[in-house]
Image (spheres, rainbow, N blue to C red):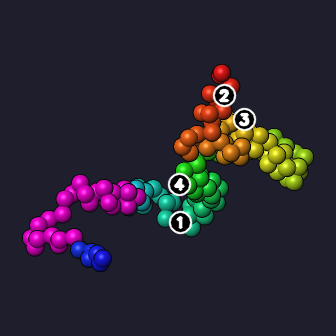
Amino acid sequence: MTTQATAAPAPAAGTRPNAAAWFQEYGVYAAVAALLLFNALFTDHFLTADNLRTQLVQVAPIVIVALGMALVIGTEGVDLSVGSAMALATALLPLYLGYGLVPALLVALSRAPSSARSTAPWSPWWGCNPSSRPSPCSSAAAASRS
C-alpha cells in the first residue's frame, strides 16, 4: 500500500493574505521590532555599547532560568517553583556578602533548593508529576484520605 502526499493548494494569484493570520504568525516579531524602533528614536542612550552590555549582563541569569523552566514545562513536567528558589537565593546573597563571596554563594545555593521543595511538594523529584495520567499525586492524596 502506498500513500501519496498532496501539497496544499497554492493561493490564487491576486488574493491577499489574511492580516489576522499574518499577525498570528509574525506578530511577536513585529512587536519586538516596534519596541526597538520606539526606543531607538526616543531614548538617548539606547543604541550605545554600554546599554547593550548592561542589558546582556542583567538579563543572562533570567534567560537561563527561563530556558530551564521552558524545558521542564515542554517535557510535560510542571515545576514552577524555580521562581521562588531564584528569589530566595537573590535575597540571601547580599545578606551574607560581608562574610565573603564563597560563603554567601554557599548559603544562597544551599537554601534555594529547600524553598523549591517546600513550594512544590508535587515536584518530580519525588516521582509525583501531576501531568501524568493517572497522577501519583491524586492516588497518594486519595490513599491518605481513606
Amino acid type, callout 1: Thr
Q: Is residue 83 visible?
A: no
Q: Is residue 12 magenta?
A: yes
Amino acid type, callout 2: Ala
Percent of width and height locating residue 140: 66, 32
Q: CA distance from mark 4 to mark 2?
A: 30 Å
> For the magenta stretch, what is the residue range?
7-32
Mark 2 sits on what residue? Answer: 143
Label 2 crowd (10 A; few <14 / some 14-19 / many >=20): few
Mark 3 sits on what residue? Answer: 118
Mark 1 sits on what residue? Answer: 48
Residue 13, above or below 121: below
Q: Secondary structure at mark 2?
A: helix
Residues at discs 2 and 3 in contact (Cβ within 8 Å): no
Amino acid type, callout 4: Gly
Residue 24's disc is: none
Q: CA distance from mark 3 to mark 4?
A: 23 Å
- Name the foreground residue: 96 vs 43: 96
Q: Residue furthest right?
A: 99
Residues at discs 1 and 4 in contact (Cβ within 8 Å): no
Q: Secondary structure at mark 3?
A: helix
Percent of width and height locating residue 91: 73, 40
Q: Secondary structure at mark 1?
A: loop
Residue 74's disc is: 4
> Residue 84 lies in what quarter of the image?
top right
- Name the foreground residue: 137 vs 69: 137
Q: Residue furthest top?
A: 146
Q: Is residue 101 visible?
A: yes
Label 4 crowd (10 A; few <14 / some 14-19 / many >=20): few
